[in-house]
Amino acid sequence: MFKNTLGGKGRIVGSAVIVLLFLFPLFLPRFYIYLISIILLTGLLATSLNLPLGYGGIFQFHHAVFYGVGAYAAALMITKSGLSPWVGFVVGPFAAAFLSLIMGLICIRLSKLYFGMLQISLGSLVWIIVYRWYSFTGGDNGIHGIPVPEIISSQNNAYYFTLLVTLLSLWALYKIINSPFGSALQGIRDNPVRSGMIGINVKLHQLMVLVIAGFFAGVAGSLFIVVDTAVFPDMLFWTLSLEVLIMCLLGGWFTFLGPMLGAAVIISLRTFVSGFTDYWTLPLGILMMLVIFFLPNGILGYIQDKLYGKIAEQAEAVEQTDLAQPAVKES
Amino acid sequence: MLEVKTLSKSFGGFVAVNRANLSVEKGEIVAVIGPNGAGKTTLFNLITGVLKPENGKVFFKGEDITGLPSHEVCKKGISRSFQVVNVFQRLSIFENVQIAILSRERRTWNLFTPSSKLAVEETNEILESVGLMGKKGRTTGLISHGDRKVLEIAMALGGNPELLILDEPTAGMAPEETSRCIELIKDLSGKRGLTILFCEHDMEIVFGIANRIMVMVRGGTIIQGSCNEVRSNQAVQEAYLGGSDVC
């Protein structure tokens, strides 16, 4: 069960969270506003990864490359072209989607782990180009002091902009997952052979989802410029891809909002624990182990299982009393 | 309607299907029988594009469909069910059938309409006809084997096929489930007028519902003919029915 329809209660909680998010700048200190902005856009990145990963069953191991390329494309457009920064913010996502299309065309011939390995190789190639091409990308220094439009240059406005774009993107992703395309995608994840046999062009649908995921990763990359006014090559290094992947697993990769939750947990952990010790990955490692052993569907997955488990049991009980003959309980 | 000519496929050195021939006329129920490992499933995989043949041709309604990918074969009007249950485990019964219908209507490129509102009526109709209506909300991973086999057929029906290929439809079913399934297959042929090609180990079922039978041994066709012809054929008796152990 993937649908995030928790009924009336869910809607109330969701609206409350959104209202709270809009009210935060009124009472939270600057540092927290910055932190939440980063959580939002990283959460969007993780959610976009979860489209091919959790819903499509594609081993998208190097998702950060689309995030980084989106950010770099926007940054270069803004600093080199002299056009309005808004143009850069539009170019970023499309550049990421285009790269995703090219890499997808090459990788989609392989499946499962082989797809992931090839993607890491190609992604690393893009990373090394960005990392070494000093004259164009600024090499390991990255690009700093990127001008952003006046209206979103203050920190609170940057936060509101990030929040709005993230919510809009999440809404679009949610629509996609629940559309016929989303159903076909989940069918392909569960069973590619069968999907082909009911008339779905498996590779073409997979390619499409990679492009969509690349696009939204590019949106997240552009948002990073709004919040941080800088880009650097670490944004497309494979360790970030791994971190985003962990966010999906931790939060629950068969749930829609799980990756967002995972992003919140990991970024908070990194920010607050690294204040006490350099070894902030130690608690993360322990947390990860606990999740894998006890909550294999992630945190939100566990919560949903609990809620739905009860509902499903009740439904079954009703069904069984409805039937005249007592059905043998099957597992 | 379906014409298979000298179709061959080998895996490594092992010849799984060896110059097999088969013809199915419109409206018929044709059974493929043969001992385990005779190549029945491989033959079905070759016809439906899951595997590519090395030699030979497959014609459907006079059109050459040899080697087409399976989603194209499906669009031509051939649907199949699988021997080993092959459904979408994490989706509900309803969604499993619905996807098949949406795919046939070429709506899987629709990105923004909620699929929960699409093709509901037709999905319900199919579920009603196969008797899964009462359980439609259940996740497929959690239903019984017999129900999953029936769901297999329901999904194949979602493609609104002219030719339905069933790979051991009753394998692993409890006796009363089996008889329900046979009734269903008869209905599909009788009421919907579907052409059906199936393979099965249970001889009672085969001789009970098939119009014609094709016998496969070691990848090749021994004979194709009516039930009586097959029963009285010397080669079949030696190769297959003669062994007391017909499973």
Image (tube, rainbow, N blue to C red):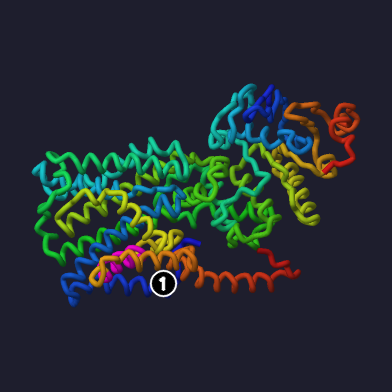
In the image, residue B200 above or below residue B140: above
In the image, residue B104 above or below residue A324: above
In the image, residue B223 above or below residue A216: above
Q: Nearer the viewer, residue B164 or B191?
A: B164
Residue B70 visible in the snapshot: yes
Q: Residue A157: image x %, image y %?
A: 16, 64
Query: Which residue is drawn at the image coordinates 40% and 67% (left, top)?
Result: A286
Q: Nearer the viewer, residue B52 or A151?
A: B52
Circle 1 packing at 10 Å, graded few (<14), some (14-19), many (20+), is: few
Q: Nearer the viewer, residue A73 or B109?
A: A73
Q: Residue A166: image x %, image y %?
A: 28, 59
Q: Which range is magenta?
A: A261-273
* Number of numbered markers: 1
Q: Is residue A82 left or right of residue A305?
A: left
Chain letter of the residue beneath label 1 in the structure image: A
Where is mark 1, residue-wise?
A10
Query: Which residue is drawn at the image coordinates 27% and 59% (left, top)?
Result: A41
